[in-house]
Image (tube, grey):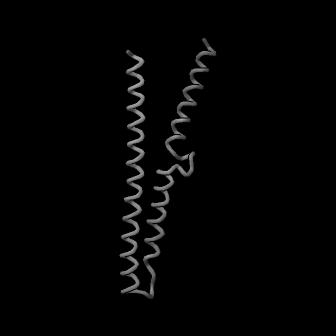
């Protein structure tokens, strides 16, 4: 009976992780959509009322850097930064601790 409960908990945990991942991806695409819409409006305003100075570029770059960082975190582009890396490191340290404890027993 306990084994069945453990399997169900594991499936539930996997479901929760997958659901969280989908929410993160959805959040990124919402961020991307708002970025595109706001940039279109700002570019229009800038070119319409003060075309001699292209100030929209600063907003484009600043927010674009934030969007890039968001993409890196959501899509695990650099695996050493992501959550998977953290979980692997935690498991690695826990395994090292177990083996150290067994060595001294």
The spot of residue 17 in percent (x, y) is: 41, 39
Residue at position x 47%, y 75% in the image: 57
Q: In the rendering, at what x and y percent does residue 11 appear?
A: 41, 31
How many callouts does the rendering have? Answer: 0
Q: In the figure, residue 20 lies in which quadrant?
A: top left
Is 91 drawn above or below residue 78 in the view shown?
above
In this view, 105 is above or below 82: above
Q: Residue furthest top?
A: 105
For the C terminus, give its image quadrant. Answer: top right
Image quadrant for the N terminus?
A: top left
Relative to residue 24, is residue 68 drawn left or right?
right
Residue at the limit of the structure toward the right, as seen here: 103
Residue at the far bottom: name it.
52
Position of residue 57 relative to residue 67, above or below, is: below
Q: Position of residue 43 (x, y in %)?
A: 40, 78
Instruction: Give me the residue at 39% from left, 20% from top.
Output: 4
Instruction: From the viewer's perspective, tell me whether residue 17 is left or right of residue 98.
Output: left
The answer to which of 2 and 67 lies nearer the viewer is 2
Q: Residue at x 48, y 56 (%)?
A: 71
Q: Quadrant of residue 53?
A: bottom left
Q: Residue sitting at 54 percent across and 27 percent down?
A: 94
In the rendered image, residue 87, in percent from the top left (x then y), is placed at 51, 36
């Amino acid at each position: 009976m306990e084994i069945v409960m453990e399997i169900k908990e594991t499936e539930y945990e996997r479901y929760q992780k997958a659901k969280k991942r989908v929410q993160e991806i959805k959040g990124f695409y919402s961020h991307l959509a708002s970025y595109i819409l706001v940039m279109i409006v700002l570019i229009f305003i800038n070119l319409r009322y003060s075309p001699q100075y292209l100030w929209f570029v600063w907003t484009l770059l600043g927010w674009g850097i934030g969007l890039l960082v968001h993409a890196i975190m959501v899509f695990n582009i650099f695996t050493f930064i992501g959550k998977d890396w953290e979980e692997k490191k935690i498991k690695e340290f826990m395994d090292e601790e177990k083996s150290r404890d067994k060595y001294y027993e």
